Every structure is written in structure tokens, then in C-alpha cells.
Image (spheres, rainbow, N blue to C red):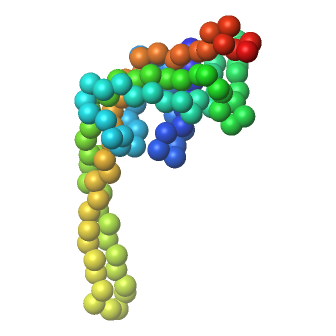
């Protein structure tokens, strides 16, 4: 089973057991993250699309690690002037392992 979730302003295609890097979440290592913004669910031949999200469907994940990406160099320069600026940036991330995609039960979906 595969789902498309939205977190941190980005969309990710996830399956159970996947490990992904997402925008930093305010959670500690070992905590459980629940993503309620599920845009689509694929189950073999069935496809369920949300408008914009699917109510009752969520994805649970375990926080594996919080860290920072490699440094990128930001260099600004104006030709023929003495303007030069060199800075760096390290984007923080959260590494999560997808545990399960929770679908609503049949009784709750009919109500």
C-alpha cells in the first residue's frame, strides 16, 4: 500500500517500511509522528484520491533522527565593485520511518 502525504509544504510518496527525510518536526528521537494530510492512497488496483485530503486516513511514522544536511555555500558578488558576501546554510531535517498507513474502518466510513 502506498500513500501520498503532505508535510512541511512538500508532498511525499510513502509505503510501509520506507525511510524518508522531511522538514524538521518538533519531535524527539523515538517519538511517533502522525500525518493526517493524506492526498491519495494506492492499494494494488484501487486508487482513492482526496479533495484535497482523504478524511479518516492517516500515516504513522517513528522519528529516527533529527539532524542537518551538508553545508551549501551562498556567494554573492557584484562585478567591478568590492561587494562580496560568502555565507553558508545547513537545512535541518527529520528522518522518519513509515510504520503503517491507517485506513478508516468500514463502520466509520458509512456514517
Quadrant (top left/top right/bottom left/bottom right) for the N terminus: top right
The residue shown at (31%, 47%) is 92
Question: At 40% across and 43% down in the image, what residue appears?
Answer: 23
Most extreme residue toward the bottom is: 81
- Front residue of 56/25: it is 56
Q: Residue at x 29, y 59 (%)?
A: 89
Q: Nearer the viewer, residue 27 or 17?
A: 27
Q: Position of residue 42 (x, y in %)?
A: 63, 19
Total numbered labels placed on residues in the image = 0
> Is residue 35 visible in this depiction of the protein?
yes
User: As drawn, is 90 to the left or to the right of 39?
Assistant: left
Picture residue at 28% right of the left edge, 53% below the top: 90
- 69 shown above or below 104: below
**Residue 44 visible (yes or no):** no
Quarter of the figure that contains the C terminus: top right
The answer to whether 37 is drawn above or below residue 41 in the figure is below
Q: Position of residue 56 (x, y in %)?
A: 61, 22
**Observer-nearest residue: 19 or 108?**
108
Residue pushed farthest front? Answer: 111
Q: On screen, 4 above or below 25?
A: above
In percent of width and height, residue 88 lies at 26, 63
Q: Is residue 89 left or right of residue 8?
A: left
Q: Quadrant of residue 76?
A: bottom left
Q: Residue 28 at what x, y percent from top left?
A: 26, 33
Looking at the image, residue 43 lies above or below residue 26: above
| Displayed quadrant of residue 79 | bottom left
Q: Is residue 1 left or right of residue 55?
A: left
Q: Quadrant of residue 30 in the image?
A: top left
27 lies left or right of 39 = left
Amino acid at each position: 500500500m502506498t500513500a501520498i502525504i503532505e508535510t512541511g509544504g512538500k508532498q511525499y510518496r510513502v509505503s510501509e517500511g520506507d525511510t524518508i527525510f522531511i522538514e524538521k518536526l518538533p519531535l524527539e528521537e523515538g517519538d511517533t509522528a502522525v500525518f493526517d494530510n493524506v492526498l491519495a492512497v494506492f492499494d494494488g488496483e484501487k486508487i482513492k484520491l482526496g479533495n484535497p485530503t482523504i478524511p479518516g486516513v492517516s500515516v504513522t511514522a517513528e522519528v529516527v533522527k533529527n539532524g542537518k544536511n551538508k553545508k551549501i555555500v551562498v556567494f554573492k558578488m557584484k562585478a567591478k565593485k568590492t561587494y562580496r558576501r560568502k555565507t553558508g546554510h545547513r537545512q535541518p531535517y527529520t528522518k522518519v520511518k513509515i510504520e503503517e498507513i491507517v485506513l478508516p474502518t468500514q463502520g466509520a466510513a458509512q456514517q
